[in-house]
């Protein structure tokens, strides 16, 4: 955690290029090596490369677009908020405060230029990673950089990009338009007043569409030490007393309605696993009282949490909000990092998952309900073909979420298509999600997904599994029809 900041040894290309290695992403990157198949993939990619972007799940702060303030520097834009970037630099021994994260122990946070140097000196660490694809596209395609980050170019790049970010065409709203984003979903606490969403909706100069997503994890996880305080916060914004079980349910229903009134179409849930319970009201109320009073053991608190997640499914079956499930991560794996730097700082680690038994209580109740819809995500590749594809291949309410987080990488995307398509087809898939906190990575990540899908479909055309006309329809549906349908956009 507190290792030094000397960069590990990497390839020395600077001598070959006089200290300035060109940044030139290849136009055929991620497309098949076989020339005939690559020609098909090019045509498929060209068909969708300029389609509007639909982003039904992500973590961009709506204030960014409501305030429309210029970005200050490349480190604050590309490094500090992106845990895909900071985690790998941290693994090389760079303390997180040297990457711009605030340290609750009072250790001074590095200034942006130093953060940028730490990143540039270790540019070689990203070779072979999906992050390298995105960052290169951000730097070259979005920000116009023409040389690779390195120790030699760090200061030059910093000054060049900082100056560019101060221009009107690089402010958040201008970039939103240039990215061709048609709809952007944020992730929001149920206690949020959604003031920034409302400000955008009321602004006559704003032509975009930014919708909130209801993320109630803090109010459903009764194992959390701060759960009672979360319920008090929910009471203060809903005006409903949450000191009893009925009050909590009423408050959650009220806030869901508020979110729907402000454009939300989906809820989002992260839990250790996909399990749910459906207790009778009296038993749920008894458990609630015991947990609220600090008298319950961990098992009882976990049982109540599973029941509250089941209540979210019940509410979705009534109000039609799509229930996106993102289980399977061991959150905050390193306690000292959590204490010092907070959550979402790169130390969440995937867990093995099980869906078939876990989801049966939910699906036997709501799986064929036409108002209910769920999008299932996983960090465990072993369940793609064994569990998720068969579930989506039967239940009309079930859509397959795109490879997510550690799996939203080119080869993992290919493995996902191989694993699920023969059982569930292409049209039980929810399309691509960028799931990002890095604003400029949105078009880069969609570009990667479109290239991978073009390559995958071109391979099926070459094998005569699909005609090229079929492939064109599929790739357009994956980038337009499927996310609209799955997330009711």
Image (cartoon, rainbow, N blue to C red):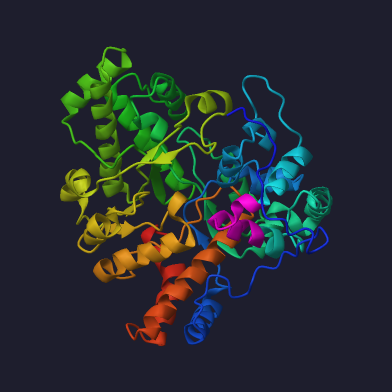
| Quarter occupied by residue 235 | top left
Left or right: 49 as drawn, with respect to 290: right
The residue sitting at 49% across, 82% down in the picture is 34
Q: Quadrant of the C terminus?
A: bottom left
The residue sitting at 71% across, 29% down in the picture is 109
Q: Quadrant of the N terminus?
A: top right
Left or right: 195 as drawn, with respect to 112: left
Vertical relation: 381 (above or below) 284 = below
Left or right: 77 as drawn, with respect to 342: right
The residue range painted magenta reads 124-137
Vertical relation: 395 (above or below) 97 = below
Viewer-proximal residue among 215 and 244: 215
Percent from the top left, x then y, of residue 460? 37, 79
In this rendering, does residue 473 appear at all?
A: no
The residue sitting at 39% across, 83% down in the picture is 461
Vertical relation: 404 (above or below) 49 = above
């Amino acid at each position: 955690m507190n290792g030094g900041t000397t960069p590990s040894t990497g390839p020395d290309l600077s001598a070959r290029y006089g200290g300035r290695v060109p940044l030139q992403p290849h136009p055929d990157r991620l497309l098949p090596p076989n020339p005939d198949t690559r020609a098909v993939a090019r045509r498929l990619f060209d068909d969708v490369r300029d389609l509007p972007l639909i982003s039904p799940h992500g973590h961009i702060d709506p204030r960014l677009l409501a305030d429309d303030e210029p970005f200050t520097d490349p480190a604050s834009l590309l490094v500090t908020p992106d845990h895909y970037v900071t985690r790998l630099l941290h693994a090389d021994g760079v303390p997180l405060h040297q990457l711009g994260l605030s340290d609750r122990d009072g250790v001074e946070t590095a200034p942006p230029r130093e953060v940028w140097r730490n990143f540039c000196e270790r540019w070689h660490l990203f070779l072979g990673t999906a992050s390298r694809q995105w960052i290169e596209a951000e730097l070259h395609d979005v920000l116009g950089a023409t040389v690779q980050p390195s120790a030699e170019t760090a200061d030059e790049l910093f000054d060049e990009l900082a100056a560019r970010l101060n221009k009107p065409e690089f402010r958040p709203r201008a970039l939103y338009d240039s990215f061709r984003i048609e709809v952007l979903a944020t992730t929001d606490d149920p206690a949020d007043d959604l003031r920034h969403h409302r400000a955008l909706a009321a602004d006559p100069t704003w032509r975009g569409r930014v919708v909130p997503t209801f993320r109630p994890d803090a109010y459903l996880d009764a194992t959390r030490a701060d759960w009672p305080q979360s319920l008090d916060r929910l009471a203060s914004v809903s005006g409903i007393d949450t000191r009893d079980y009925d009050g909590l349910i009423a408050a959650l229903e009220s806030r869901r309605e508020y979110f729907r009134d402000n454009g939300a179409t989906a809820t989002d849930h992260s839990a250790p696993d996909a399990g749910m319970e459906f207790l009778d009201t009296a038993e749920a109320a008894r458990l609630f009282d015991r947990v609220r009073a600090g008298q319950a053991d961990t098992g009882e608190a976990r049982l109540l949490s599973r029941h509250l997640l089941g209540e979210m499914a019940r509410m979705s079956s009534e109000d039609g909000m799509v229930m996106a499930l993102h289980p399977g991560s061991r959150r905050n794996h390193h306690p000292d990092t959590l204490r010092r730097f907070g959550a979402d700082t790169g130390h969440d680690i995937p867990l093995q998952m099980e869906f078939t038994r876990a989801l049966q209580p939910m699906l036997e109740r709501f799986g064929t309900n036409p108002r209910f819809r769920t999008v299932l995500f996983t960090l465990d590749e072993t369940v793609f073909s064994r569990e998720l594809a068969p579930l989506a291949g039967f239940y009309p309410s079930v859509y397959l979420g795109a490879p997510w987080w550690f799996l939203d990488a080119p080869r993992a995307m290919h493995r996902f298509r191989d694993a699920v398509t023969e059982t569930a087809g292409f049209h039980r898939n929810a399309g691509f999600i960028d799931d990002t906190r890095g604003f400029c990575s949105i078009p880069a990540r969609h570009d990667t997904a479109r290239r991978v899908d073009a390559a995958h479909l071109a391979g099926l055309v070459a094998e005569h599994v699909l005609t090229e006309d079929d492939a064109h329809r599929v790739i357009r549906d994956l980038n337009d029809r499927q996310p609209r349908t799955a997330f009711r956009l």
